[in-house]
Amino acid sequence: MADFVIDYETLYQLGKKAGELKKSVEDARANESGSDYTEEQLGWWTLPEVVGDFWNDWRYAFQRAGDVLGSVESTFTAIGKALFEQDASLASMAGTQAAQFDYADYVGKKQAYEAWQKLSTTYVTMHHRDEDGNLVARQVPLADASSKPELPGEPPKAWNYTDPDGGASSTNFTYGANGEVTGISSNIANKDGLNHKENTTFTGNGGYKTDIDHADGKSTSVEVTVSPDGTTGTRTIIDADGKKIEYQGSMTDDPKSWAKTLDQRDPDKQN
């Protein structure tokens, strides 16, 4: 069975080209008094009259062409942006996971180094007999100095990727005073200038707030707040039209279950 594939970047480019062509048609129609060409503009004899007749015959066709091209531009660019958003959301998720792998690797190396550092300076008393058979005590570190692990250095601050087509993905960490991750932001861009941005701030107890800027210029947000005991939570979504959707859930369920309690898009669900 054949795959169905849409090249949304080409679709978006076609939409932009249609917009450029529409502008050219509008420029061609800019002189609304098209039949009033003079001999000084176009030369003598019948040429001004012929051009004027052509203008009058085609004026409304150009207008209709401009309207159609405008519709093509808005439709194609809207579809291109919507399909880009789907890919960008997945790319943002993948970039965040890759960045978190880097961070987890850093944490593992840091913990291994700190454990070695502690054990290499912690001594225990060992007894053995010398060559004369006398019992001798000596201090031995719990970790061998020669087994020193790699020093991890600074925690990772960014993860970046550029694809062969010119698209770029970047993910950045924000750290607190104690070295904990307090936020993650990502930016996905393609060669046509479409952008998808996400910024997540962690609020404690497993809660977070994510603000998303979409390619069409609209914004949405998702906020999860968790009770101090970590058992229940509230999930609030603000959609692109500014309307709120709320859920209540149990944080101890696996997977977590959310029950909708408010939906300002649906009159029956509003408080």
Image (spheres, rainbow, N blue to C red):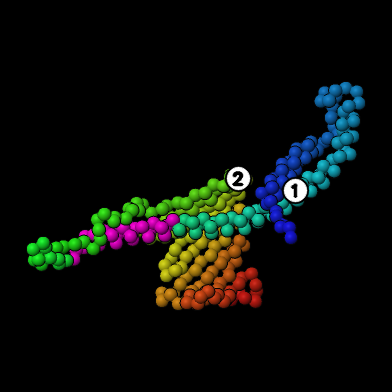
Q: Main secondary structure of the magenta part?
A: helix
Residue 108 within the segment the image draws in magenta: yes
Left of 160 or right of it: where is 83?
right
To which residue does mark 2 refer?
Answer: 165
- Residue 70's disc is 1
Quadrant assignment for the C terminus: bottom right
Instruction: Where is residue 28? Give x, y as percent.
Output: 78, 37
Q: How many marks?
A: 2
* Observer-nearest of 28 and 204: 204
* Mark 2 residue element: loop
Instruction: Where is residue 1? Give x, y as percent.
Output: 74, 60
* Mark 1 residue element: helix
Instruction: Where is residue 168? Give x, y as percent.
Output: 55, 48
The kind of residue tagged 1 is Gly
Q: Residue at x 17, y 66 (%)?
A: 126
Quadrant location of residue 56? top right
The magenta-colored residue range is 102-125
* Observer-nearest of 256 and 101: 101
Q: Residue at x 49, y 56 (%)?
A: 98
The kind of residue tagged 2 is Asp
Left of 100 or right of it: where is 18?
right
Left of 55 or right of it: where is 79?
left
Q: Earlier in the sequence, mark 1 or mark 2?
A: 1
